[in-house]
Amino acid sequence: MGQVLCSVFYRPILILGVFVFLASLSWAQDKSQVDAGRKIFIEKRCYTCHTVNAEAKLIEKEKEEFAKAKGVEVKPKEEDEDGEEDQKTGGDLSGVGKMRNAEWIQKFVQNPKDYFKDDPECAKKAKKKYRKRFKGTDEELTSLVTYLSSLQYEEQQDKDFKSCLKEE
């Protein structure tokens, strides 16, 4: 009787423990995938057109580490004639994971030209040469999409930024 009571009592606790353990493994895997994606964001120089203002310090630190590993210097931020930082053509990605799902992000990264408006102002601002599709392995693409999907901060676009993406 005591053994039956013990197994009835401890079995749910054991099952719960297994689920918590498996969930923590999944979280650790997602975190490593996010970290790998952030590194891809740096290595593929996505930051030349895009900002992630919500993670600016982390991005700068990783850019410096990457440059140091490659034996090059990080260029200082460019400023316009008014002394203000040059606005990125691609805008801020801090909230992209909140606004778009992973499938949309992957399709966009693979072929961004399909998503741009065809109006003169956008054509001038986001020149065709800047609408680059991702050139990397499938594994790198998966990591990058995981990272971008994890960016679920409040949007932090510059006040003058005009999106050139088609409305859905």
Image (cartoon, grey):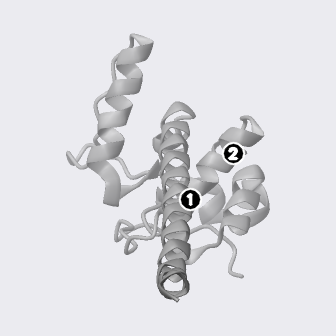
Mark 2 closeness class: few <14, some 14–19, many ≥20 residues within 10 Å: some
Question: Is the residue 168 above or below the residue 151 in the image?
Answer: below
Real-space Cα distance between discs 2 and 1?
Answer: 19 Å
Question: Residue 125: percent from the left, percent from the top?
Answer: 56, 55
Residue drawn at x 55%, y 38% is 40
Number of disc labels: 2
Question: Residue 109: percent from the left, percent from the top?
Answer: 69, 53
Which residue lies under the disc numbered 2?
141
Mark 1 closeness class: few <14, some 14–19, many ≥20 residues within 10 Å: few
User: Foreground mark, 2 or 1?
Assistant: 1
Question: Is the residue 37 above or below the residue 70 in the image?
Answer: below
Query: Residue 132 — which label?
Result: none
Question: Residue 54: percent from the left, percent from the top?
Answer: 33, 60
Q: Amino acid at mark 1?
A: Ser
Which residue lies under the disc numbered 1?
26
Location of residue 73 (image quadrant): top left
Residue drawn at x 25%, y 43% is 81
Mark 2 and mark 1 residues within 8 Å of each other at the beta carbon:
no
Question: Residue 36: percent from the left, percent from the top?
Answer: 53, 41
